[in-house]
Image (spheres, rainbow, N blue to C red):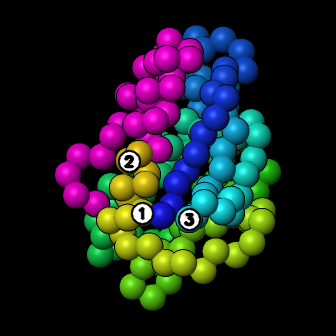
């Protein structure tokens, strides 16, 4: 099982508009596979990541290229990536603790993204009183 885990959601300054959430809302992020942390980072721009992941999952499966997170807040792309491997996908990071070789189906990968997006939206409402659902919609239909 794969999980994008977020803890300690916080806003680094006022959120005058929803767009501010992309750069001012952070959390501690971990990519976890079968209970092992592949990658973790404090103060990660989770709204920007979730929006990019949801957008990637909404692409047609037949033409879906590898995902590489290219953030306004990080100096180089690849802090989170999803790469095609055989008939599935591998998940990792430029700064991963170890190379996770397990492959996940498109459905498994996009279900993980859906859970992450829903968790972020719920945490935004509970912790910050902000509704991120316009920026990070849940996926409609099958991946």
Quarter location, residue 80: bottom right
Determine the residue positioned at 56% across, 17% down.
127
User: What distance separates the C-alpha of mark 1 from that of mark 3?
Assistant: 14 Å
Quarter location, residue 86: bottom left
Determine the residue positioned at 42% across, 63% down.
109
| Badge 1 vs badge 3, beta-carbon distance below 8 Å | no
Q: Which of marks 2 and 3 is nearer the N terminus?
A: 3
User: What distance separates the C-alpha of mark 2 from that of mark 3?
Assistant: 18 Å
Quarter of the image that includes the C terminus = bottom left
Q: Return the x and y of residue 131 as percentages of the image width and height.
A: 43, 20
Residue that numbered label 2 is attached to = 114
As displayed, is residue 68 above or below residue 45? below
Residue that numbered label 3 is attached to = 34
> How many circles with numbers are drawn on the protein?
3
Q: In this view, does 6 lie to the left or right of 111?
A: right
Q: Which of marks 1 and 3 is nearer the N terminus?
A: 3
User: In terms of depth relative to the viewer, which is nearer, 137 or 107?
Assistant: 107
Determine the residue positioned at 47% across, 44% down.
116
Q: Does the magenta stretch include residue 133?
A: yes
Q: Return the x and y of residue 142 as percentages of the image width and height.
A: 22, 58
| Numbered badge on residue 109 | 1
Quarter location, residue 76: bottom right
The single residue placed furthest to the front in the displayed view is 35
Q: What stretch is highlighted in magenta?
A: 116-143
Q: In this view, does 1 lie to the left or right of 28?
A: left
Q: Is residue 78 left or right of residue 19?
A: right
């Amino acid at each position: 099982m794969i999980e994008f885990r977020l803890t300690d959601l916080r806003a680094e300054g006022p959120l005058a508009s929803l767009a501010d959430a992309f750069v001012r809302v952070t959390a501690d992020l971990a990519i976890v596979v079968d209970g092992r942390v592949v990658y973790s980072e404090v103060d990660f721009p989770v709204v920007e990541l979730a929006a990019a992941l949801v957008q990637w999952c909404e692409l047609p499966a037949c033409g879906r290229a590898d995902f590489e997170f290219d953030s306004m807040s990080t100096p180089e792309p690849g802090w989170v990536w999803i790469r095609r491997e055989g008939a599935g996908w591998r998940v990792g990071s430029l700064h991963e603790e170890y190379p996770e070789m397990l492959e996940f189906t498109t459905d498994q990968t996009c279900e993980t993204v859906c859970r992450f997006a829903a968790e972020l939206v719920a945490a935004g409402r509970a912790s910050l009183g902000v509704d991120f659902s316009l920026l990070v919609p849940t996926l409609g239909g099958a991946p």
